[in-house]
Image (cartoon, rainbow, N blue to C red):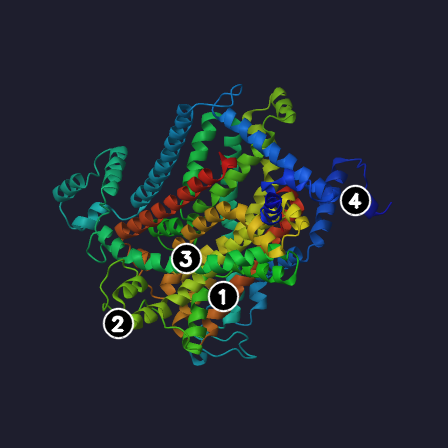
Amino acid sequence: MNEWAALLMRLLFSRAPVCPVLVKYFYCKQIDLYIKRTFVRNAYILASKQRESAVLSGNLSEPAHSMTERGMDLAAGVLRFAAVTALTFLGLLAITFFIGRVVPIDPVVAVVGDRATQEVYEATRQALGLDRPLLVQFGIYVRDVLTGDLGVSLTTGRPVVEDLARFFPATVEMATAGILIGVLLGVPMGVIAAARAGSWLDQVIRVLGLLGYSVPAFWMGLVGLAVFYAGLGWVAGPGRIDIFYDGLVPTVTGLLTVDALLAGDWTIFGNAVSHLILPAAILGFFSLAYIARMTRSFMLDQLAQEFVTTARVKGVSEWAVIWKHAFYPIRVQLVTVIGLSYAVLLEGSVMVEIVFSWPGIGNYLTTALLRADMAAVLGATILIGTVFIVINRLSDLLYRVFDPRSR
Amino acid sequence: MSVLDWLTDDAPASRLQAQAGQAWSIARAFARNPLAMLGAVIIGALVFVAVFAPWLAPYSPVGQDLGSRLLPPSAEHWLGTDELGRDIYSRILYGARITLVIVVMVALISAPLGLLIGAVAGYFGGWVDRVLMALTDVFLSLPKLIMALAFVAALGAGLQNAIIAIAVTAWPAYARIARAETLTFRNAEFIAAVRLQGASHLRVIGLHVVPLCLSSTIIRVTLDMAGIILTAAGLGFLGLGAQPPLPEWGAMISRGRSFILDQWWVATMPGFAIIIVSLGFCFLGDGLRDVLDPKQREGR
């Protein structure tokens, strides 16, 4: 008898697709129908998956394939993945190389000045490798970039790589805080919008999302500064930290908030957070728009599925239906979306950084731009482009690993 | 037989009647969507303002009046004046011209480029497809704003170069769409029929493939417009787009930056113009997608 009770408990509290066959015996006719549908669907998915994997291994007649074949599939997949990533990176370098060549400034004249004699000019030209074929020059350029040689910045006089290492943590800190805000608010907003589709709440969230596509980030930064810094005095002004706290905590990670925590200094941590919160919130707003929109659309797909109806008919609470049954399957898609919006945030931080005088890559890049410091511009472009590509590819990989349908 | 009957006839007698009827039903579906109509009205207003700016603007967009610097919004200067005493309302009206030029030029450069590349790749398939799509994917996986910045850095600041830089980064999305559309009908019988009649590949692509990709490309272009306007305004804000004294909205915000705490209207007013126009394109794009291409509709 105990077994029966246990079975009953399992039936009542477990997820719908787990035990459709058994539930059948305990519920009335109408539920029976739903469950049959779910069961048939599951069986169909199972069969089609088997068929797919058989097709993948190129072996239709014999579905069970050996471990070595599966290993070969994996190896081919990894190889293709690496090749595409490398190709994209090479494309990025080709574009920056091209941009570097398009510049109307003669690189030789930039080094020797326009009063140099013809001999000096020619010697420098050869030293810079500019007399060689374009393809060879590109090869040298790729080798330099891969060995971490991005040239010397005209503005700071330091190697570009060193500059980037100094400025990049600030950007990472802001973008990470931004994506945290975007995810923590955007995902629940998308779920609620889907659960209450068509309600006024849904409309409000939709308008907020559209605003995320149509408000200039720099404008929002300025208005935010005027309202929350100058008007209300809730947050600290531009910059990363107040000047008298500057350099008081040892640099470990380069993320000021983390460094302050590591040093155990709460005053500095509080100051850094009050500087960080506004730019991060503005950045987060833009990722929130995209994340909420995608979450809503994924959730609507799931809520229309029959296993959700089954769960509802079984009497599962609405909260559990939404957060456990419907939300659970979309997590992989969501991670992809979040990864992509993180990459976009890193890029979008350029504008926000300028408004907030944030000492990050965006500020470095634009300062260099206005002074025609091409080595620095291209270095920053390569860095942001590389991070962008890596995150893009990683989300793609994650999707492939966790979602069997995409294989 | 009234005009309405003629338009809604189930059995059109001529090609003209069929096309007019189709246009009529699309227009009716579009008019039922309030947000789409709002978008259309906003974009219509943008075009109107851009064309008639000299008649609508009460002041010159560049004329300086140092006696009336930084005046707050009033009956005389509806949106206030900037640091050189120029009327912000007039400048915003003239700025609509610049925005419209940017949007139209970027669309005219990048959409045909993307369409052509996508259609050629999808139509020929094989290695042509692979090479072109690899190129597209490389561009697609690069950060757009940063690439636009780098291009402008290389070409030099200015409106024309900003347009080129944005267009260069905008085309890959259209190529993807055009290719996907082309793949769905490249093996269709009407293509084979045209080929059998002796049409060249050029003719097939130009007259039969591209027109069928148009509607989804137009939708995508409209949806992208908001992003293009924001990028252009961003370039203007950085001083890389339209050069002073041109009343470009992003550049106007940038000039108002120093006065944001005391004279807030200088920087905020052009921002509202940008937001309204971008929202207009978003609404219009959403509406067009619902009407022209129901299968692409997101779950909304």
Across and down, in percent, residue A137 comes to 25, 37
Tag 2 secondary structure: helix
Instruction: Identify the mark at residue B271; answer none if there is no mark.
Output: 1
Q: Same chain, marks 2 and 4?
A: no
Residue in view at x 40 percent, y 41 percent: A393
Where residue A377 sits in the image (x, y, percent)? 30, 52
The label number, if any, that marks residue A209 in the structure image: none
Q: Chain of mark 1?
A: B
| Mark 1 touches mark 3? (CB < 8 Å) | no
The answer to whether marks 2 and 3 mark residues whose Cβ atoms lie closer than 8 Å is no
Dot 4 or dot 3: first in sequence order is: 4
- Between the residue at mark 1 and the residue at mark 2, the CA separation in whole angstroms equals 34 Å
**From the viewer's perspective, is residue B245 above or below residue A335?**
below
**Left or right position of A23 against A69:** right
Q: Kindly identify the amino acid type of the residue bearing the numbered disc 2.
A: Tyr
Q: Which residue is mark 2?
A: A245
Do circles 2 and 3 both sit on a common chain? no
> Residue flagged by tag 1: what amino acid is it?
Gly
Q: Chain of mark 3?
A: B
Q: Nearer the viewer, residue A273 or B31?
A: A273
Q: Residues within 10 Å of mark 1 (few under 14, many from 20)?
A: many
Q: Are marks 4 and 1 on the same chain?
A: yes
B133 versus A240 height, above or below? above
Q: Amino acid at mark 4?
A: Leu
Front label number (2 vs 3): 2
The percent coordinates of residue B202 (x first, y second) are: 54, 28
Residue nearest the viewer, comparing A58 with A325: A325
Residue B235 shows which numbered tag? 3
The residue under label 4 is B7
